[in-house]
Structures are given as C-alpha cells and as structure tokens.
Image (spheres, coloured by chain):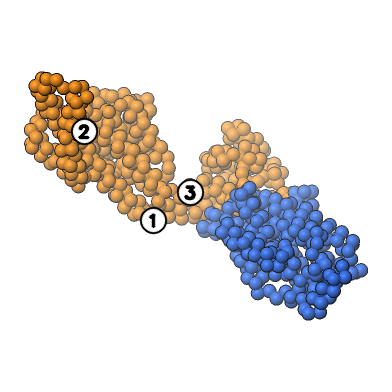
Amino acid sequence: MMMGFFVHSGFLVFLGLESGNIPITNVYESFISLLWCVLFVYINLDYLYKLPSLDTFLVPLVTGLSIWAMTFDGGNLTVAVSLKNFWLVAHIIPIFVGYAAFTISFSLSIMYLTQQRQLKLKLFGSLFNKLPSLEGIDRLMWKTISFGFPLLTLGLVFGAFWVRTQNILGEMWYLDYKVILGLATWLIYAALLHMRLVASFHGTKVACMTIAGFCLVLFTFIGTFFMGSKHAFQKVNEQTHIEVLKDFQVK
Amino acid sequence: MSIIVVGLNHKSAPVEIREKLAFNANNIPSALSQFLQKHPSSEAVILSTCNRVEMYVSSLEGTLKFEDILSFLSEFHKIELNYLSSYLYHYNDDRAVNHLFFVAASLDSMVLGESQILSQVKEAYTIASVEEATGKVLNQLFQQSLNAAKMVHTKTSLGKGKVSISSVAVEFAEKIFQDFTGKTVLVVGAGEMCELLIKHLYEEGARTFVVANRTFERAQELANAYQGQAIKYELLGEYLAKADIIISSTSAPHYVIHVDQVKEAIKHRRGNPMFLIDIAVPRDIEPGIANIDNVYLYNIDDLQSVVAQNIDERTREIEKCRSLIEEEVEHFMARLEEMKIEPAITHLRNHFHNIGKEELNRLKPKLKEVGKEDWEQVVYTMERTINKLLHHPAKVAKQEAKNGGGYRYVETIKKLFGIFHHHSNPPHQ
C-alpha cells in the first residue's frame, strides 16, 4: 500500500510539474488527485486506528477507479485559465479529502455487510477470522464520516462563495447538476450523522446508507459529465484557447 | 548417562488411579529430595497435572532402572506396587525424550493443542531446578522441550481455533462486539454451561450480568458470584431490549424466547446488534429469530460444528508436528552424546596440564636466574602447546560422539592416555 502511495505521489508531482498547476485542472487530473487523497487518508487512518484487512476491500476499489480514470474520456474538459485561482483550491481540496473519507467509509460498509452476512449464514472461513467485529467496523464508519462531512461542508461553502462572487456558473448556477447533486450528497451524510447523533443509529441500515452516499459521491463526481453539465469546465479546442488568450491579454 | 520417564495419563489410567499418584506443589520438593537421597547421582523432575503424573529421571551411570522409580512412587504414595504397575508406562532415552517433547507440545493432551500443558511443564521444571534436583541433562532436556513445543505451535496450526463450546461462543461474540465492557449479558437458566459462558465472558471484560431462572434462588446464587442481578423468570421479556448478549440453557420443553418478543426488543435497540446463544436441547430460542435484522442466533449445533471442525484441523497437523519433534529429538540425542564425552575431555585436559605443571616444576630449579616475565612466557608456551595438541582430538571426538556411541570414545580416550580413575562431573551444577 505504501509503495503504491509513493508511486502515486510521484505521478501526481509529475502531472503538476508538467502542467504547472496543482493537478486538479482537468477531469483526469482530478480523478488521480482524488485517488491520492483516498490513499493519503487511508494511510493516516490506518496509522491512527489500525484498520485490519481494510486494504482487502479498498485496493480493488482504488484499482478499479484508477483503471476507470485512465480509460475515462473526460471530453477534453479543462478548467479555464481565469478560474485557476485561490477559490479553485479552497473549493476542491476539502471536498476531495472529504470524498476520500467517504470512499473509506464505503469500503468499511462493504466490510460490515460482508462480516454481517458471514455471521448470519455462519460462514466461518479465513476472511471471517481476519475481519474485525461489527461494532469495531461500525465505529470506524462513524469516524470516517464525521471526518469527511465537515470537509465536504467547507468545500461546498467555498464553492458557494465562489459562484456568488465571481458568477462562474451563470445566473442559474443553482440548476447546475453538480450543484444539485453536491447538495444531495451533503444532505444524505447530514442525515446519517443526524441519525447517529440523535437516534444513535447503528448496524446494517447505516452501512447501506453509507453505500448509497458513496454512490452519490461517485455520480456527482463523474456522472454529471454524462448529463451534459460542465460545472465550469470547458472543452479544450482552438476557439477556447484563442478566447482564453485574448482574455488573458486584455487583463 | 540415561533418561527414563515413568508415568500414567488420562489414556492409561482412570481418574481414581491418577488421583492416588498425583503430587501437588507442596509435596513435590520433598518427593524430589527423598528420591535424590536414595539415588544421589541422578536428576529428577516430577510433572503432575489433572491428566498425568510423570517422573523424569536421568541417571549418570545409567544404572537406574524403571523398577527403582516404580518402587519409589509406590513407597512415597503408599500404594501397592502390583496394583500400580499395570497403569504405568515407561520409556528410555530417545523414546523418553520423544515422549516429553510430545507432552510439552500438547500432542499427548486430552484436548489436542491446548496451551496449558506448556506452562505446567515449565512449572514442573522450575520446581525441580529450585530444589536443585536437575543437572546438566534434565536442564538441557526441559529447556529444549519448551523450545520445541513453542516451535511446534508457531510452525503448525496445532493451537489454532477454539475447541470448546464456550470459547467458540465467546469468539463469535467478539466478532460482533469490539469489547464487552458496558455490554449487558442476559442469562436464561443457571446450569453449568451458563456458568461456564459467564465465566468466559467475565474474563473477557463483561461485567453486567442479568440472570433469570425458574428457581430464583439459583439465579441469585449465580448472579452473586459475578456481581450480577437476578430477576424473576416472568420478567424475562422486559429485559430483552437491554441485552446485548443472551445465553439460554433451560430444560424447558418449549421455546422461552419468541420471535415477537425479539422483534419488539430490537426496535428499542437503535440498530445495535443482539447476539443470542441457545445451548439448550430442546431449543429455548425460536429459530425464526435468526431472520431479524441485526440479530445473530447460534444454537448448540452451530457451535459444536465449529468445535469439530477446529479439532479436525488440529488433528490434521499431528503428522507435521511429529516430524518436527523427531528432528528436535535427534538434535537433543546428539547433544546428549556430546555431553557424555565432555567429562572425559575435561579429564584428558587436566591430565595433560598436570603433566605440564610437573615438568615445569622440575624445570624451574634448573634454570638459575630467570626473570618473572620470562618464566611467565615459558608457562604460557607450555599451556598453549597442550591446548593446541588437544584442540583437534577434542573437536573430532565431540563431532563423532554426536553420531552416537559417545561412550566408545570415552573408553578409547581413557585407554590411550591411561586415565583410569576419573570421576565424572557430579550433577546439580
């Protein structure tokens, strides 16, 4: 895992040096950065809480997403030069670290449901012995969600400021798919936390809701591109380049 | 130099016999000292557990017989010799070593692979060594038996997997709950099996026990033993929602915990899991309860099948353990042969050095004016020459002795150098 993390970090630095930006300015770079955040958060959590055999669940997920990132056709979408500023970093970084925490809570949920199924069906193989207790997994799920949620909130708040102050999504910014889905993601995790805090909600239902939350995260991140939402990304073509250059020269 | 073990175990003798021959921590020291008074040039260790009583003896001259140990045991415990002998087994030398290694590795235990025997062997050895009843041979033997046992446990899965109903149940509980502190254990029935499970859970950190039993006094008795609370059997339903772990083992001919009750209870548990263990036959807990979300129900068959599976797995490891132990026995026997030759080599060395000293004493008056430093050089050269001369034969003799027949070499050395009256190193060092 550590080896993978270092290779990934190296690749990210390479991407950054090549483009001269923090590598979050196109869809591919964003994907790679997000996966780096997942590994970063995992390694830190593993150090803090010792997450036995979570890598069994996380590695296939990260590998799958990496392959997707490499084959994903982002339609040459990139962030306009004019948007490469403080707000971009303030908006994206907290959201990505939050997403990373949600990815881990998703893996924990799969782990929870696997262990729960083994306990119900009385399947006592080597995986059963390796996995921790349901209660232990549940506690970690709670920790990762409560770590990711404030970061997601922060990222969304910065995004809202950005959109209001610089009018980057137009007048009807609140109809942007990514904005709507982002809000839905926030709501689902807020609901989870609320149920946990107020009704001390545990168990299978929490695991299922966490999975639903993560699906929404993935959809918000990638799915919106299929729906035609560009969310401030724009196609890289001759025209854009000329416009961007003009824009730059005027400034 | 010989090693003998005499003893009986759960396979060779019933408990009535075992208890007659059993020793306890208080009388082992006196038994050892009595034995050594009778047989001064020997070493002894007594291993006495609920499943076995064994006496390991090493005799320096190799003259001690199995019958000597047998008669000592019969005298010490005042049991008829004939009565005893049919239950006892005895092994000599490599077979005795093999037996101890088997015992220590828990291959001869009633519950294959249990870990308690290792500490019992260790304790038996410690008592004997404190009493100065062990010497070169048994020190080496017991230390190596402990190492071999540990090695067998790490290299095989002999000790893996729980092999009792209660430990398997606790293991499952550990897969549901991270820890047992703050968890409520509801016990229905107050039989022996319930008590065993409570004990196990208590050891793992559970502190809140609620006991319900038809006979309230018995419930109270059990609850008091673990600082728990006894409740009236009729109130059982009310306590279900509070219980994280429920153990049921009543002799009721019908179910005592029903689906509806648990469905109602789980509503109040806010998704917290509930673990139910039904060890009663006929069953106490309605099987349909297993289908409720966040509820885990295990009956006696579920637990027993895991126990059987684990025992099977341990049994499959026996061959692997056997070959590991055989290797260890070979190493030990080689070391023993080497040990046999060591006193002879020491004597040979002393013999040569004595001759050297005599010659130096003869030389000194002849040299009129020799300085202190020069004389020291002469003494040093003499010692160095002797050591150099002896180095190779000693090395070869030790090496050859390892392959067996150490005594042959001892005899040859004695004959070649005319060392006829040597006394080997005494034991207890």
Residue matched to label 2: B59
Do we see residue A136 in this rendering?
Answer: yes
Pick the quarter of the image with the N terminus of chain B: top left
Image colour assigned to chain A: blue
The label shown at residue B229 is none
Say yes or no: labels 2 and 1 on the same chain: yes
Pick the quarter of the image with the C terminus of chain B: top left
Residue at 81 percent across and 77 percent down: it is: A242
**Apparent side of residue B79 relative to residue B354 in the rendered image (left or right):** right
Residue matched to label 1: B316
Q: Amino acid at mark 1?
A: Arg
Gap in angstroms between the C-alphas marked 3 and 1: 15 Å
Q: Secondary structure at mark 2?
A: strand
Depicted B126 relative to depicted A29: above or below: above
Residue matched to label 3: B162
Q: Secondary structure at mark 1?
A: helix
Depth order, front residue of B355/B297: B355
Read off the chain for label 2.
Answer: B
Q: Amino acid at mark 2?
A: Ser
Upstream in sequence: badge 2 or badge 3: 2
**Apparent side of residue B160 relative to residue A51 in the rendered image (left or right):** left
Depth order, front residue of B244/B260: B244
Residue at 61 percent across and 39 percent down: it is: B206
**Apparent side of residue A9 relative to residue A160 in the rendered image (left or right):** left
Upstream in sequence: badge 2 or badge 1: 2
Badge nearest the viewer, 2 or 3: 2
